[in-house]
Image: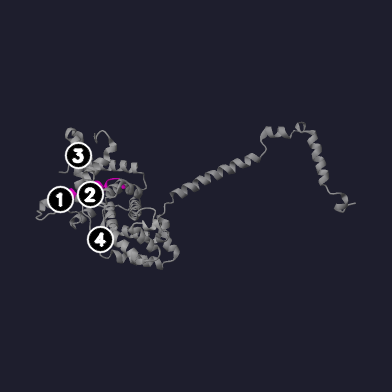
C-alpha cells in the first residue's frame, strides 16, 4: 500500500506521479489508494497544482549576440596577463576552508610555543630536589670526573709546560 | 580504449576542446546554451543577469578545458558549475532586485506560456498576477531548494545527477525537494 501522508519516503513517488514519470504499476496503486485516502488525495491535488503552475512560467529566448559576447570575453582573457586571467578564479574560489586551516594552525603554533619551553625549564621544587647534592649518586660523579680527565688533552698537546 | 569509446558525446567533445579543437567548444555551446541560460534565469529571474552568469559558466568550462576529466556526465558537470555560479551570486547579495524588474519582464511577455488567443485586459492582468505569484514563490525558496526544484522540474535531471550538481547526497536532495515542494504547495494553495 502506498500512503503518501504516512510515509515521507514516498515523496519521490508523489513527485514522479505528478511529473508523469511513475511506472504504471505504482501509479495505479497510488490512484487506488488515493480513492480511499482523503489526505493523499489532497496532497496529490496540491502537488499537481504546483506542478502545473510551475509549468506556466516561460523563459526568454537567449540574446542573438550571446556567442559573440562570450567569444569576445574569451579573446580578451587570452590576451590578458596570466595574473589578470587567474584573478577572477581566485576571487571566486572559496577561501573559507583555507582561512579556517590557517586559524587552526595558528592556535596549534601558539599552544606549542607555550608548552614546549615549559618542558625544558626546571620546574620549581621537584627539579631542585633532583639537583640537591645529597641526592646525587657518588659513583656517577666519579665516572663523570674520569670522563672529563680523558677528554682533557695532555699538557704537551696544549703546548703548555 | 573501451573507456573512451563508452564516453558520451559531450565528454568526447570536451576532450577535443582540451586538445585545442575550438569547433568542439562551439558545438557544446550550441547544445547547452539554452538550458544553462534558462536554468540561470529561473534562479535569478532576470534576463540580463542570467545571460551574464551563463557567460561566466561557459568561460569557466573553457578555462578548465586543460584539466577536464570525464569523471561524470558532461551535463552534470555543467550544471554543477552553473549551480555554483548562481548560488555564489545569490549568496553575495547581488539579487537586490525591486519588484519593478519582475513587472517589466511580465510586460515583455516573458512570463506567459499559456496560449492566450483573445486576451482581454482583465484576463491578461489575472494571468500576470498569477504568474507573478508563482515566480515570487520560487524566488522566496532558499537558494539550494530553488536550484533543486528548477533542475527537477524544468531540466528533468534525475536525483543522482541533481545531487551531484548540488554536491549533496541523494537522501539530502529528497529531503530538500520535499521541503521545497511542501513550501510551494502552501504558498500556491490559493491558486485556482
Q: Which mark is residue A28?
A: 3
On the image, the x and y values in percent for residue B80 come to 35, 52
Range drawn in magenta = B126-143
The alpha-carbon separation of the residues under discs 4 and 2 comes to: 19 Å
Dots 4, 2 in contact, CB < 8 A: no
Crowd rating for badge 3 (residues with CA inside 10 Å; few <14, some 14–19, many 20+): few
The alpha-carbon separation of the residues under discs 3 and 1 comes to: 34 Å
Dots 1, 4 in contact, CB < 8 A: no
Q: Which residue is mark 4?
A: A62
- Main SS, magenta region, reads helix
Q: Are marks 2 and 3 on the same chain?
A: no
**Disc 2 element:** helix
Answer whether residue B59 is visible to the viewer in this image: no
The alpha-carbon separation of the residues under discs 2 and 3 comes to: 32 Å
Crowd rating for badge 4 (residues with CA inside 10 Å; few <14, some 14–19, many 20+): some
Q: Which residue is mark 1?
A: B127
Q: Are marks 3 and 1 on the same chain?
A: no
Amino acid at each position: 500500500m502506498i500512503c503518501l501522508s504516512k510515509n515521507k519516503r514516498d515523496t519521490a513517488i508523489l513527485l514522479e506521479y505528478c511529473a508523469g514519470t511513475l511506472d504504471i504499476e505504482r501509479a495505479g496503486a497510488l490512484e487506488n489508494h488515493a480513492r480511499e485516502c482523503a489526505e493523499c488525495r489532497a496532497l496529490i491535488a496540491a502537488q499537481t497544482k504546483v506542478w502545473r503552475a510551475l509549468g506556466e512560467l516561460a523563459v526568454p529566448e537567449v540574446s542573438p549576440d550571446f556567442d559573440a559576447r562570450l567569444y569576445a570575453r574569451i579573446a580578451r582573457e587570452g590576451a590578458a596577463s596570466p595574473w589578470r586571467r587567474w584573478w577572477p578564479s581566485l576571487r571566486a574560489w572559496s577561501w573559507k576552508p583555507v582561512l579556517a586551516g590557517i586559524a587552526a594552525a595558528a592556535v596549534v603554533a601558539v599552544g606549542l610555543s607555550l608548552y614546549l619551553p615549559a618542558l625544558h625549564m626546571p620546574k620549581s621544587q621537584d627539579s631542585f630536589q633532583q639537583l640537591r647534592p645529597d641526592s646525587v649518586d657518588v659513583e656517577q660523579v666519579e665516572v663523570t670526573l674520569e670522563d672529563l680527565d680523558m677528554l682533557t688533552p695532555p699538557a704537551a698537546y696544549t703546548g703548555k709546560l | 580504449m573501451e573507456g573512451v569509446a563508452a564516453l558520451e558525446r559531450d565528454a568526447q567533445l570536451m576532450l577535443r576542446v582540451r586538445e585545442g579543437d575550438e569547433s568542439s567548444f562551439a558545438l557544446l555551446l550550441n547544445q547547452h546554451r539554452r538550458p544553462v541560460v534558462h536554468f540561470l534565469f529561473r534562479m535569478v529571474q532576470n534576463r540580463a543577469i542570467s545571460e551574464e552568469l551563463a557567460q561566466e559558466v561557459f568561460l569557466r568550462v573553457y578555462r578548465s578545458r586543460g584539466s577536464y576529466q570525464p569523471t561524470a556526465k558532461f551535463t552534470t558537470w555543467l550544471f554543477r558549475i552553473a549551480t555554483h555560479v548562481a548560488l555564489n551570486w545569490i549568496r553575495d547579495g547581488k539579487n537586490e532586485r525591486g519588484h519593478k524588474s519582475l513587472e517589466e519582464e511580465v510586460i515583455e511577455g516573458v512570463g506567459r506560456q499559456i496560449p492566450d488567443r483573445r486576451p482581454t485586459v482583465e484576463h491578461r492582468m489575472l494571468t500576470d498576477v498569477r504568474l507573478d505569484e508563482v515566480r515570487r514563490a520560487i524566488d522566496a525558496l532558499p537558494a539550494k531548494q530553488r536550484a533543486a526544484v528548477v533542475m527537477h522540474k524544468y531540466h528533468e535531471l534525475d536525483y543522482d545527477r541533481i545531487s551531484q550538481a548540488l554536491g549533496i547526497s541523494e537522501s539530502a536532495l529528497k529531503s530538500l525537494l520535499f521541503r521545497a515542494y511542501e513550501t510551494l504547495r502552501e504558498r500556491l494553495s490559493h491558486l485556482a
